[in-house]
Amino acid sequence: MKSISLKEVRSMNLEPLKVRSLGGYIFHSSDKVYKLFRTNDKDIILNKKRKIEILSVMRDYAHAFLPIEKIEDGPFWNRTLKGYTTDYRSLGIRMDSLGLDPLRSEDYLRALINASKHLKEIHERSEEIVLGDATFENIMVYPDEEGKYTETKFIDFDSIQIGELKCDAVSALLYYYFFVKRFSLNFSYLTPDMDKISHLLSFFYLIFGDDIFSIKPREFDQLSEQLNTLYRLRPTFYYLRQCCRIPDVPYLHQVIDVNDAAVLSKMLRNGVKLY
Ligand SMILES: Nc1ncnc2c1ncn2[C@@H]1O[C@H](COP(=O)(O)OP(=O)(O)OP(=O)(O)O)[C@@H](O)[C@H]1O
Ligand SMILES: [Mg+2]
């Protein structure tokens, strides 16, 4: 894997990406993103380094921005990993900030379906990957050939779980869910189900603007009379709230009904507050 020095990165005239990032400092050039870690913890850095090296050779996977080069500091006999680069594409919008817009409901649902299919593909790979931080904050959406925002790419691969290598960040929604349910969250062994749950919790958050425990069942039932996707998710919604062990849930693409776009647009156009 190619390496570039931190000094070289500092000498470039890079634009900071205007984002709030807990894990790093993010900059970009016309074609590359430079992510510099905040942490100096040796174990975390070593863990990230191993993951980045494995991911950088996974060139057959097109639906994620995988690490390309290491950014390192120090003399060649004692280099420390400081960050990594990935591809940059302009016109991207983060899935969670795409916003529910009456003109874009169909694009939104299609983007969610695409991202969810890609999540399933990732889970089925031989590398045994669990994203861990699988919220909509880590999905970028890009315009397709028709200019519709439906193409998706996952980001933030330095925190994932891959084989024996531990995940070092899970989504806040999943963390809160485990906390309320009093399930123990073992960072050494996350399962693909946890990513599916994160996607569902993000979807409920998008529609209701709240975590799953604060959504009123009456409001859920009312809206599920109008949106088939929610109707299909009704048993999952109640199961997630009530079950006493980590539930097996569907992938989003298995329940999203694109025909909901027309209903959703109409509701948004009429100023109906979804939550
Ligand atoms: N390839 C990219 N293209 C465009 N924007 C990006 C890209 N990579 C990261 N970003 C932006 O930078 C933000 C932070 O990136 P990333 O999720 O990799 O870092 P993080 O520090 O782990 O963030 P957090 O802890 O907040 O999830 C993203 O939410 C996104 O807005
Ligand atoms: Mg992130």
Image: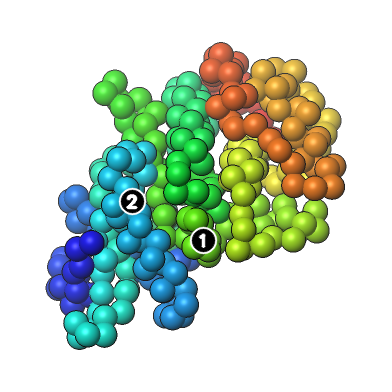
Q: Which mark is residue 106?
A: none
- Other residues around mark 1 within 10 Å, as few (<14) / some (14–19) / many (≥20): few
Q: Nearer the viewer, residue 90 or 245?
A: 245
Image quadrant where residue 67 sits: bottom left
Residue that numbered label 2 is attached to: 66
Choose the circle earlier in sequence order: 1 or 2: 2
Q: Quadrant of the N terminus?
A: bottom left
Q: Quadrant of the C terminus?
A: top right
Residue under the point 83% across and 43% down: 243
Q: State the SS at label 1.
A: loop
Q: Report whether residue 27 is seen.
A: no
| Amino acid bearing label 1 | Glu
Q: Position of residue 258 (x, y in %)?
A: 54, 18
- Other residues around mark 2 within 10 Å, as few (<14) / some (14–19) / many (≥20): many
Q: Is the image coloured rainbow, by chain, by secondary structure, or in one colour?
A: rainbow
Residue that numbered label 1 is attached to: 164
Residue under the point 18% across and 77% down: 7
Against 118, residue 268 (above or below) is above
| Amino acid bearing label 2 | Leu
Q: Position of residue 255 (x, y in %)?
A: 62, 24
Q: Report whether residue 267 is seen.
A: yes
Question: How many numbered marks are there?
Answer: 2
Q: Nearer the viewer, mark 1 or mark 2?
A: 1
Label 2 CB less than 8 angstroms from ligand 1: no
Q: Position of residue 225 (x, y in %)?
A: 75, 18
